[in-house]
Image (cartoon, rainbow, N blue to C red):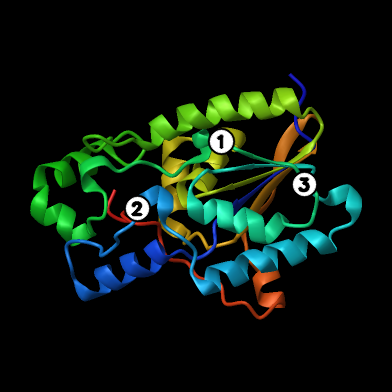
């Protein structure tokens, strides 16, 4: 199967869920105060500004280096990010549920303290199994998300051989794409996850060199600094607990 010419992935802009999760963790609360279901969490005003900065970065690229097609998570915060970044560019957009955020099941909306207090056995099971393989009841492990991404990437490669494709997704999606595309081992993925705070509207990309996608940039936020748009690095709701 022919390889893509270029692949980029943008994490969504700052969301209301990011802000509420950070507030709950800092206050030592057990539950994150968020009324919307995860799929309906919107961007903040700053998140929209960050997404617009991505759009200006894309517009400034030479025509031959701009994305030709975009695949976007159907969650509201990613759809809003894609609309702000790609609106008016003419780039075709397809929504695909395989790019959705990881589902946390019974641990959804719990802080680290909430998980330890309400589900101590699950906290211990997670420590034992590790983040790649631990699946919360009713939720997904990172390995489950990888199965989705493997399927998605097969389709994207088949549909756009040699093309330039942009994905718009979530924090876990960016990290797991590195694992998948770069052939990382579990310990290497965990080292990246522990050492990296994924920025909202950061850009990670790979470029085709000799028929293989090679890393080009990771968690890049230069486009935000250039626009005097503050980068933010809040984790997704519940992501820090599991």
Res. 128 visible in picture = yes
Given residues 13 and 185, the one toward you in this image is: 13
What's the distance in space between the residues labelled 3 and 2, CA to CA? 31 Å
The image's mark for residue 91 is 3
Q: CA distance from mark 2 to mark 1?
A: 21 Å
Mark 3 touching mark 2, by CB under 8 A?
no
Q: Which SS class for mark 1? A: loop
- What crowding class fits label 3: few (fewer than 14 Cα within 10 Å), some (14-19), or many (20 or more)? some
Disc 1 marks which residue?
96
Give residue 52's position: percent from left, percent from top.
67, 67
- Any mark on residue 239, and which? 2
Question: Which comes before the other along the chain, label 3 or label 2?
Answer: 3
Relative to 33, residue 163 above or below: above
Residue drawn at the location 45% of the way across and 58% of the way down: 195
Q: Position of residue 154 (x, y in %)?
A: 63, 24
Q: Secondary structure at mark 3?
A: loop
Instruction: Check the image and name the residue furthest to the bottom.
Output: 228
Q: Is residue 74 left or right of residue 239?
A: right
- The image quadrant that residue 102 belongs to is top left
């Amino acid at each position: 199967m022919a390889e893509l010419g270029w692949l980029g992935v943008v994490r969504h802009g700052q969301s209301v869920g990011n802000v509420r999760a950070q507030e709950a963790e800092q206050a030592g609360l057990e539950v994150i105060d968020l009324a919307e279901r995860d799929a309906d969490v919107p961007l903040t005003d700053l998140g929209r500004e960050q997404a617009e900065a991505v759009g200006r970065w894309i517009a400034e690229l030479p025509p031959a280096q701009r994305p030709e097609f975009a695949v976007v998570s159907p969650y509201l915060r990613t759809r809003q990010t894609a609309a702000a970044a790609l609106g008016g560019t003419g780039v075709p957009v397809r929504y695909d549920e395989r790019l959705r955020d990881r589902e946390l099941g019974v641990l959804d909306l719990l802080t680290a303290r909430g998980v330890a207090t309400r589900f101590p056995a699950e906290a211990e099971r997670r420590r034992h199994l590790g983040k790649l393989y631990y699946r919360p009841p009713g939720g997904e492990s990172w390995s489950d998300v990888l199965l989705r991404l493997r399927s998605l990437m097969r389709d994207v490669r088949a549909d756009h051989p040699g093309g330039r494709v942009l994905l718009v997704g979530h924090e876990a999606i960016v990290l797991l794409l590195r694992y998948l595309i770069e052939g990382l081992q579990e310990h290497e993925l965990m080292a990246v996850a522990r050492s990296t705070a994924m920025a909202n509207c950061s850009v990670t990309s790979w470029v085709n060199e000799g028929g293989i996608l090679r890393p080009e940039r990771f968690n890049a936020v230069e486009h935000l600094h250039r626009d005097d748009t503050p980068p933010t690095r809040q984790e997704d709701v519940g992501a820090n607990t599991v």
